[in-house]
Amino acid sequence: MATTNAQTTGPVSGLPLNEGARYHFDIYAILEAPQELYFGSEVAVNVNMVETVEVMLPNGSVIEKCYIAPSKRRGVERRTLIWAPLANGTLLGDALGCGIPGTCCRPDCPMCSVYGGLVTSKTKVTYVQGGSLYEEELEPTTYLGRLTHGGGVAVQAQEVSTKQRAMHPSKMLKQGEDNPTPFRRQYNQPALLYPVYNHCLSITDAQFNAIAYAFLNVLPRIGAGNPKGVRVANGDLLGTAQSLLVVDRYRVPLGARPVVSPAITNQTEAIDSFAAQAVQVRGAQRQSPVTGVDQKGDVIEEHRESSVFTRWIGAAAMKELEERALSFTTNVLLAGTNPRERS
């Protein structure tokens, strides 16, 4: 016999009831940096050092590669959502009272609902509504993130470059105590390829729309300091040059994961490996930019709501992300009301 306890404490998972159908989503991509990039790791002997990793090759030798740490991408994506502007000019984080480290842990928050959050003790937060400031007291809460990031190890094993930099005053000529401060900084070389992926566990289509918005918006913002910015690299997919990008929506994973081995050091080999896995669905090579699998296990060349697996690749994957990012912009950022009022 059912008790009333579940009605007061919520389900075991803690997620809201009747939120909508949930799916798993994946984004796979190869990013290309058109210029040198800096991803800070530590400072040693007046040199700002970039983050690198050591990779053991099949022959037993060890090489060092540049690295975009998944945690760095995650932080930039979350801030992109926090700083997303609403129609009235208020930023989304201000409207919800959610930031870093001051997360709100609201189940309807586009950031906390997928990236997770933490309120360590009773805390008062300030949010903006109707041009006025309001306060809300938050209870101690832990909200586990359902979005994970992976990859980021550069394909090519190019050595970092070190350049001299100086912090100059704004005046053309200035004498006195405030002298320019010279320093040296390492940089990842231009044209490096970075295979990356995002995985989303049991989220709704609306929540993935926010992730698509963040993924596309961080591309010109990746990097610490200046210069910064990457793009989704192009390569041969289905016989044409397309974005090296794959998007999956599924209940069961039925496609090969386009994850490039960190042991690969050749660009062509890395792109070929990504492309070969991108078209593998149900153990066979598929020649459609959109491949679905219905509940009977049959492969179809389209996406249906009832599909247990759908894969978009190349230009079709980019279009899918763009449409979802547009949906987030229209339905959340430009909806005309504070997200708190719609919850």
Image: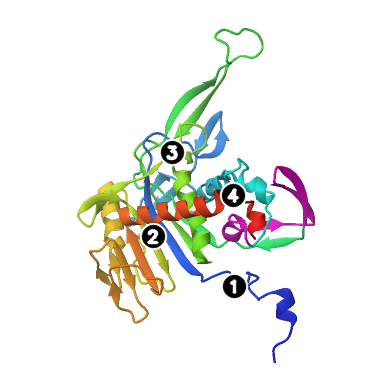
Tell me residue 198's x, y (percent): 46, 57
Tell me residue 287's x, y (percent): 22, 64
Frontmost residue, 30 versus 52? 30
Tell me residue 155's x, y (percent): 35, 48
Secondary structure of the residue carrying tag 3 is loop
Q: Residues within 10 Å of mark 4 (few under 14, many from 20)?
A: few
- Decide: is 260 above or below 201: above
Secondary structure of the residue carrying tag 4 is loop
Q: Residues within 10 Å of mark 1 (few under 14, many from 20)?
A: few
Give the residue number, with chain letter if any, for mark 3: 229
State which region is magenta: 108-137
> Label 2 vs label 3: CA separation?
21 Å
> Label 2 vs label 1: CA separation?
26 Å
Sequence-wise, which precedes: disc 4 or disc 3? 3
On residue 247, the disc is: 2
Q: Which of marks 2 and 4 is in front?
A: 4
On residue 18, the disc is: 1
Sequence-wise, which precedes: disc 2 or disc 4? 2
> Label 4 vs label 3: CA separation?
31 Å
